[in-house]
Image (cartoon, helix red, strand yellow):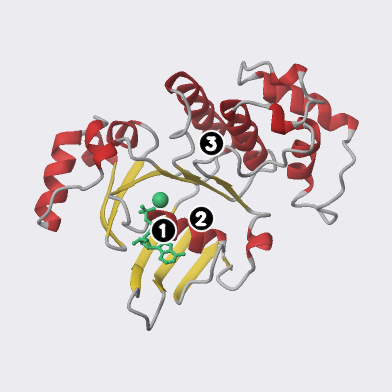
Amino acid sequence: MLEIRNLCKTFAKGTVNEHAALRSVSLTVADDDFITILGSNGAGKSTLFGAIAGTFYADEGEIILDGRDISNLPEHKRARVIGTLFQDPMKGTAPGMTIEENLSLACNQSSRFPLARAVQKRDLAKFRENLARFEMGLEDRMKMKVGLLSGGQRQALTLLMATIAKPHLLLLDEHTAALDPATAEKVMGITVKIVKEQRIPTMMITHNMGQALSVGNRTIMMDAGQVILDISGQERQMMTVPKLMTMYSGARGKELDNDRMLLSQ
Ligand SMILES: Nc1ncnc2c1ncn2[C@@H]1O[C@H](COP(=O)(O)OP(=O)(O)O)[C@@H](O)[C@H]1O
Ligand SMILES: [Mg+2]
């Protein structure tokens, strides 16, 4: 379980560019929660992930993961228990290393010797089996350098790397947004499967409102550094994209200003 209490982050404090990106965000993510996160551009969604993953330290507030306060842990230590995926398929894998070496690194990340590069034989069968699920032919190219893969293949590999060591939390920041529609759908389908099978508490940022309501079990909406909506259960089942947009403009007195989002019904 993840507990976020009164998380605050202001960028460029004391300058003309000062910007409060997180304004006292509190949120509890249960073990079986798959939360989708919506919000217009600049709402603070990626900043929330950055604060949780330790890309930077929050100014105030606590982040408790499975009972442990990780607020002051550096990013590389949090990475042992938090899997992250971003929009850019070039992030998250080492291009000069092979597929199996990348997966091996990910497996060893939570062990005592995180940089042990040797690929264990028993791991290979597991890698092959997991790669085959993507139906991208990756299982037959395990000795290929990752830099030679397409964006979609690379993102699929990153997803596997982020989840193979069973993280305590998975953060997905528009991880299928840069992929072509067919590949995006494939990667999304496998994401849902992996999360369900391994019961990984998951938070996923998406600009697709229809997807936000259909994937996972709970949807939150952020605006101006705050969580302004948190729906689950029956309320979420009854929710539609037009209703969500009306609720947003009603609560904020303005229209959702993310063009991409308006197009994605
Ligand atoms: N490193 C940074 N330095 C200064 N301002 C930042 C930084 N990161 C984000 N911001 C600002 O914080 C706000 C929230 O950004 P972000 O969390 O990326 O929004 P979202 O992901 O919801 O689109 C934006 O106004 C953005 O310009
Ligand atoms: Mg963002």
Answer yes or no: disc 2 within 8 Å of ligand 1.
no
**Given contact means CB atoms under 8 Å apart, are the residues at marks 1 and 2 in contact?**
yes
Identify the element where label 1 is drawn: strand
Q: Nearer the viewer, mark 2 or mark 3?
A: 3
| Residue 99, picture quadrant | top right
Q: Is residue 147 left or right of residue 38?
A: right
Residue 148 falls in image quadrant: top right
Residue under the image location 27 percent in, 31 percent down = 264
| Amino acid type of the residue that numbered disc 1 sits on in the rendered structure | Thr
Viewer-proximal residue among 77 and 236 = 77
Other-residue count near label 1 (Cα within 10 Å), few / some / many at <14 / 14–19 / ≥20: some
> Does 14 sit left or right of 76 as displayed?
left
Residue type, numbered disc 2: Met
Choose top left, top right, bottom left or bottom right for residue 233: top left
Residue designated by label 2 = 1
Q: Identify the residue under disc 3.
A: 195
Instruction: Tell me which label, 1 or 2, sits earlier in the chain.
Output: 2
Mark 3 secondary-structure assignment: helix
- Given residues 48 and 260, the one toward you in this image is 260
Q: CA distance from mark 1 to mark 2?
A: 7 Å
Residue at x 86% of width, y 30% of height: 122
| Label drawn at residue 236 | none
CB under 8 Å between discs 1 and 3: no
What x and y, as percent, mark residue 212?
A: 33, 37
